[in-house]
Image (cartoon, rainbow, N blue to C red):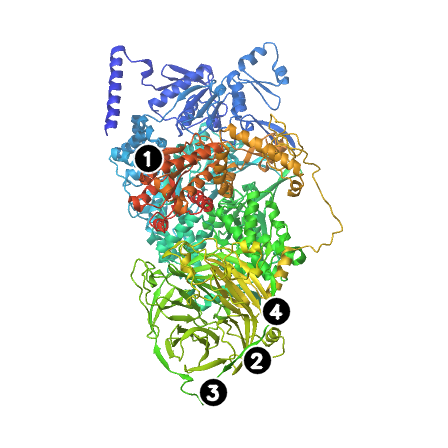
Amino acid sequence: MSWIRRMSGNRSNSRLQVLKNILKNGPERNDYFLTIRRCSNQAKNGTEQVSIGDITVTVRPPRNVEVVPVKYLQDTPPQSVLHHLKWIMQKDGLKQDVFLIGGPGPLRRQVAMMYLELTKREVEYVSLSRDTTETDIKQRREIVSGTAYYHDQPAVKAAIEGRVLVLEGIEKAERNVLPILNNLLENREMQLDDGRFLMSAERYDKLLDDHSIEELDALKLVRVNENFRVIALGHPVPRYRGNALDPPLRSRFQSRDINALPFKEQLEYLQEEFSGIPVAKISQILSFGTAVNSQESSTLGLPDFPISNISGAVKMLQTNPNLEVTDVIDKLYPYSVILNKEGVSSVQNLLKTFKLQHKDKYINKGQIVSVKDRDQGLVSVETDKSKTFDVLKGCLETNMENESFIPTPYHNSVLVELIQTHAAHDFCVIGARGCGKSILVEKFAQLLGYELEPIMLYQDMTSRDLLQKRITEPNGDTTWMMSPLVEAALNGRLAVLDGLHRINQGSFAVLHRLIHDRELQLFDGTRLLRHDRYEQIKANSEMTDEDMKERKVFPIHPAFRIIALSEPPVPGSASQQWMTPEMLTMFLFHHLRPLSLKEEVDVVTKVVQKCPNMDKLLKFVHELRKSTDPAMTSIAASLSTRQLIRIAKRLASFPSKDLHGIIQKACMSSFLPKLPRDSLEQTMEAADIKIKANSEMTDEDMKEHHLITCSVKDGMLTIGNTQVTVFNPGNKTKVPDVLFYENPQHLAVMEDMLKDFLLGEHLLLVGNQGVGKNKIVDRFLHLMNKPREYIQLHRDTTVQTLTLQPTVKDGVIVYEDSPLVRAVKMGHVLVVDEADKAPTHVTCILKTLIESGEMHLADGRRIVSHKSGHVSLDNTIVGHPDFRMIVLANRPGFPFLGNDFFGAMGDIFSCHAILNPDMESEMSMLQQYGPNVHRNVLEKLVNAFGELRSMADQGLISYPYSTREVVNIVKHMEKYPNDGLRKVVKNVFDFDAYSKELQETIIKTMHKHGIPYGVSQAEVNLAKEFPLPPLSKTGSWSIQRPEQKRRTAMMSLPVETSEIVIKGPLEVFPQSVAMEKNTARASLFTEQESYWNIPMHETNIISDVAVTKASNQAAGKFDIIHIVTANPIGLFSVNPKLSTCSVLDLYDMFPSTSGSYRPRVRIAPLAEPLDSNVFLHEEVTNSVLVVNFKTGDVCRLSSRALPEIPTEKRRFPASALQTVNPYRMCPSTLPDAKGTILFYKEGGDNIVAVTGKYAHSVDVPLVIKQAHQAGADQWLLSNDKDEKFLVQMADDNSFLLYPISESGDRSLVRGLSSVPLSDEQLKLSLRNENAGPNRTSVLRDSYVSVLKGFPGSSDVEVYSSPREPLPENKSQAQEIVNAPTFGLFGSSTTKPDVNPTKRSQIVCLPDSGQIVEGLPKWKVPESSLTSAERAREVSGYLEVIDPVNHMLRYIPVPPATRQSPYLSWMSSIADSHLFVAPMSEDGLVTVDVGGCIRTWETALVNLQRSLGEWKNMMGLDDGRPLQITKERESGRKAEGPKHGKIDPKNAPHHGGNTWAGGTGGSNTAGLGGIGGPYRLDAGHKVYQVPQHEKDAVPEHVREAARDMAQKAFKERLREINMSEYDADVYEEFSKAVRNQVSSLRVILDSLQAKGKERQWLKNQAYGDLDDSKLIEGITGEKSIYKRRGEKDPELGTPQEKPKRIRLLVDVSGSMYRFNGYDGRMNREMEATLMMMEALEKYEEKFKYDIYGHSGEDHKVVLVDKDKVPTNNKERLIVIKTMHAHSQFCLSGDTTLMATQHASDELAKEEADEHFLIILSDANFDRYGISPRKFGEILKKNEKVNAYVVFIGSLEDQASQLIKQLPTGHAFICLDTKNLPQILQQIFTSTMLSGR
């Protein structure tokens, strides 16, 4: 209140001073109380004189009374207005033109009209806009009877007729338009286009002294009337938007500042006008408005309060005296919608100053009880909360019923408010998409009997589109056609302007006079007047309606009203803040909030019959709407009430429980940026809306999902479970017919489309290019037999071309129907393709067509709904009930960056996301395109292109490779099978051949999946074959089998059966991880097929590997590889076909590995029905677990037969050995349904067979050394003397023991197969014709032995291939032990000669009969390896013994990518650093110590087949020359390097060898050429010379070029003061991130591309013919073209600012300290360097700086935003500074302070967007940093998008920390290559908030 008291005091002092002067000196002449005095003068032809004060003018009778303003001047005008009129009168007497300047509102125009009415002057009025051209002011050609005539326009008519030219909106006209008036204003002269010359009256009259009028007419001289004046009206620029006055134009005017009436005068006027309203209320409203506009409030930055609208708002108090003042202010000044938080707070404080308390809670205004017709076009409206009041009605009958309107208390209340506002003024309804604006206005119109005139506004709409359009008559004459808005004004309709937020305000300005004064002057000279003014002119002139019509004067119907509909503005946005001070003066505003939860439930249930329960969905939607995250609120807009009703209708007809899928479909979540998508997922999870798990799906669901089919039978189309009758069109020529191969995914999409089609919905299909959108639609329409109309949009599409195509025939403009109009007429389906390419302000005109079935066409016709009751007439098209629209669009956002069609209009369509087909669907489709292409090749293509698409989505590459490319490849291979995949993929990737970084990425990806792209030569590198020593009979075994029924006590073993105690299950959550598959046969064919790296911790070690084969699974398609680790214990289950890994952390199931406990775990897979389970046996503690690797259920088996042994609780190993568990597991190689697993007591006499839930303990009469499975329920036992015994378990769980006697020396069995060789294999192995039972085995002194007759016969013959026994340790192999010096348990020792606990790595492959053993290098015979091979680093060798083919091979296994620090632990488990297991079809899998899984083919048959496929894929030539060879060379030779001439103009040069900086040339420095000394970028487009020409450069030329480049490099280093050492250091860092810099630049280029897109510039003298200017072209005008160009910013809009980025890096001591642990400091320096290099040359778009923080300072300036590094030296200094600071700074942490400071500093700066990216380690605990506090700082400033990237972490610090920080604002990046993806997510995360 203090500042108001101060204002009042100042005002009082000023008044006292004025009074003192008056009393002292007498009144000054300027302060007279002015009045208007009129004095008739009969002697002067009826003229009269008018005086204001001491100024008098003579008033002459007008010749054209219809152009003289009336009913503007009040009987007693306010004194301030009289002063303005007096001033204008003075200037009129001086013959000076005037400029009335002031803020928005009608006062300036009304003052001008008052003066003209007072002086009875005729007026010519022009409302200037951005569309105004010279012809609108000066002269325009019209064609009459085939001849073009010039018609004078307002400026010329006013000059000749002596009228006053009123030019309103001077600041809106383009700069080149108004200068044509300069000479007319200054000298009253103008040269006209028809040859006439306007001349001032004085000069013309002088010429009459010497010439006659006829002579002057012959000279085409025309006299400018001496009474001609110009009154210009405009806003001050730059305070308001617009062009500043051109100095020459400004100098020709006298200006007058016309502000709002003084407070007292305004209050007196309102009191007099509204005498029944309490003065206090009027005073409060006026006081508030005056305070907002005061100088004192200007610092708050508030838009002007529309003082001129107060009279309209006060009228609302007449209809409802109980209305709160704050409600009235809200209608005048909707500050809560147009202002940000600070602005809203300022206004609310101001309201409190005037004792006005804003109520947050909406006050219900009741509901309408009755609407009764009255006389004089009025209706009486009665509500239940206010008195009855009268309002204007329309021309139709009133109607209280509206079936489509579902009343809610809120909407009923809003209707009351709308009708009360209708009594006062035009109004605008503001509300989010889909909140019910349109249906509310429709109900409003029905209540008051109005006929609606829907007018869709769009950005390109011109003033002519709003008011009048030029057309041609059938005879070719040009004429003008009234717009729907003008027709509505003439006929008393309700004009609904939909999309006020879209239209350009420079064009909309032409409606100011219509809205404020109900007057309009059209382009053809027609005048529309308010009905009372029209009647006044008729009465004054005694003219009839026909007379007025002849003079082109028409009355505006008194019932005419305008309602505008709009979406809320975006406060602070340069492009989306449409509610300017000027717009505020035009309407009263109503903000329509979204429905509350209860209201929305009520509406949805009443609209949808049999509506399902949607409470959960609606609650979720309302939680989403409450979010403060702009991205979430944007997503919520996709779930508008309209969309929810659509969902309810669908659920009512097609029930579904998949709420998660419904929300995803409505929000198009597949296409959201990653951060908003993750946030949406988390929000859904919090609301208990989850993905429908497979376990929850019924058998019917599963069947429907996998077996969806499509058929047409008996006139019925069936897709899945949905049916429809096939349409029978009259004309089938437009029914599409396309080659289409069905696949499950596309059929599922078509079924969804069919469901929506049956519900009457229009469809929107969104997806990447090439995913099959067009094919799906065409197939869909073909199946339904529906005719199609097709239209493809593009960036040049306009509203006119979308609806009609104008052409000129015989000089007449003829409009041809577009496909859209034809589809509406005939009931066809309109397919709108590439909808995202057209501007959204163009496509938005489809909204009214879809919502109401109505649309206006350019030729004057109107489309109306078939429900409207209209009949088809010449100007009316009744829409066909079968009309449907299917719109196709690419996904929004990166990398397409088209217009966001879904964001703008998605909620009026039923939306379907068309994704790239899943693997199954794509394979199904490709197999139909290429039935003869091998499935393996198709799988490689599908996987490789799938990864490329993923990279495109992440922004790592710019082009999103689609199914279309894969289909083309498959088609080629089907047609030309000999052309090899290596060559065919070049058809796709040759586009990218000249981008080195992209080429490297593609080659790497292709090779990963086994596609040999980029391979110049292929090589087969199979292991060398050695002859296997022949198998010869070396002995025999005799199995002692008693006769049947003569079992002795010794043969039948005692069995003790006990039930196993099952503890659990304990649920462990299985974590699913996608693994990266690498195919090993890209350019080199070896036995190795593929490899993966499992995601295990670096301290972990491999303990065992096993495979659940597909044949042992219930519904298994693929093998599952199981790897068990020991530190900590964990299970990794890998599906190699899908490259997925399920990880189970079993750490809590076993004792801690601290102390001397070193677990050794073995694994045994089970068969159906237990196929999802595996046995885990921990050999140290004898713990047995059964783990379900799918569900994560873990059960512990406890039995007396297998006692567990507790671990010792010692920190260090004891000298005495702890108790050793003797039990070992013998995994079954033939798993059965019972799940039988044998355990044996090593060094004891007991075996335990576990079958199901029972354990059978059997004592045997031997000391067991080892056990091998010999067959189903058969085991071969050996004792310490190598005596052998066969144990067999019968069906009744009894056990029999069969001793085996051997002839000769007993041999140690190292391995035994459990299945026999086939008869044919046995014959080949033994080279005889014998057949029978057999087993292959590996004995101590044989490569392989065949046990013929074992185990079925009593007599067994042993055939062996002899070998020297393998060495037991390295000393035997005469090699040095290279074990680690220190392990976890102290110093390593040499390996013992015999370690019984070590695993044998022998596997038997049943189909081929091969035996494979994993050997360390030192066990491989020296003669088998060359010296080079012996020096090669490997993990081990696979010894492949093939007895069938009598061959022996040693296959090297590549070394592990990492080494565990606990390698000695693993050495106690196995000799080699390699684990081997068999797979299906004789496949093989190995796992090395680094966790690398490799699959192998060793079987000869498999290798031959794969080699044939590989050769076909490579497309290797057969060596025969082709008949025609054509080589095209450039004709240039590399003769010698030189720098080249410097072009001072820097013109682009291509080819030649003259200029430096050229491209594609030779010898000179440039880019893309050959033979030059070094690269030199002059900023031009690069033309690349083919690689083969570069390869042809002679060596001496290359050497000379290298020398010259080296010299130039050193010179460059001297220029930037950089040593060669510095250059090497810089290169070391730069090289590491080179590909990442390239990826980041792809992202930045794409973000920049859309901003650079040029737009159409209209009214040009050259370019492309503008369809909207065809008539002007016929009449001969010149500016009828349009052309592409950089469009100037909208007048007055804030200049586009760059995005502001601050990189805040951690340079604390911990970064240096732990750099040796995880390389975090190096990673941070690489990341910083990557940012600096990537942002170079993007300074206009991105402005960045780099700050550091440490324990010393929270704002270490590393890069200043105004001085960014420009060369390598400066960038190196930055990263060196970071390193040095981290090394020498004090310890401590200022992360919180630094983040707070950076966020606050960024928020103060003006920028397009603000990004704060914090690089830090996760060492928060050490310094007591609260994650919650840190999260609050990240989210504190709404303007700043703050994100933290953790680049260092001890253990799982970072992952734990992220869970406590705001979702989507924290990332982990432990590899710099992932940083571009993270930055891409950050930059695109704000995309939604800009919708």
Image depth: mark 2 or mark 1 in front: 2
Q: CA distance from mark 4 to mark 3?
A: 38 Å
Q: Residues within 10 Å of mark 3 (few under 14, many from 20)?
A: few
Disc nearer the start of the sequence (2/1): 2
- In the picture, residue 269 is in which quadrant? top left
Q: Residues within 10 Å of mark 2 (few under 14, many from 20)?
A: some
Q: Which residue is mark 2?
A: 1332
Left or right, 509 with respect to 1128, comes to right
Disc nearer the start of the sequence (4/1): 4
**Are dots 4 and 3 in contact, CB under 8 Å?**
no
Of all residues shown, which one is farthest toward the right? 1523
Q: Which residue is mark 3?
A: 1042
The amino acid type, in three-letter code, at marker 3 is Pro
Q: Which residue is mark 4?
A: 1445
Residue 1765 visible to an observer of this rendering = no
Disc nearer the start of the sequence (1/3): 3
Q: CA distance from mark 2 to mark 1?
A: 85 Å
In this rendered view, identify the residue nearer to me: 117 or 1891.
Answer: 1891
Label 1's element? loop
Label 2's element? loop
Give the x, y percent position of residue 121. Answer: 46, 22
- In the picture, residue 1255 is in which quadrant? bottom left
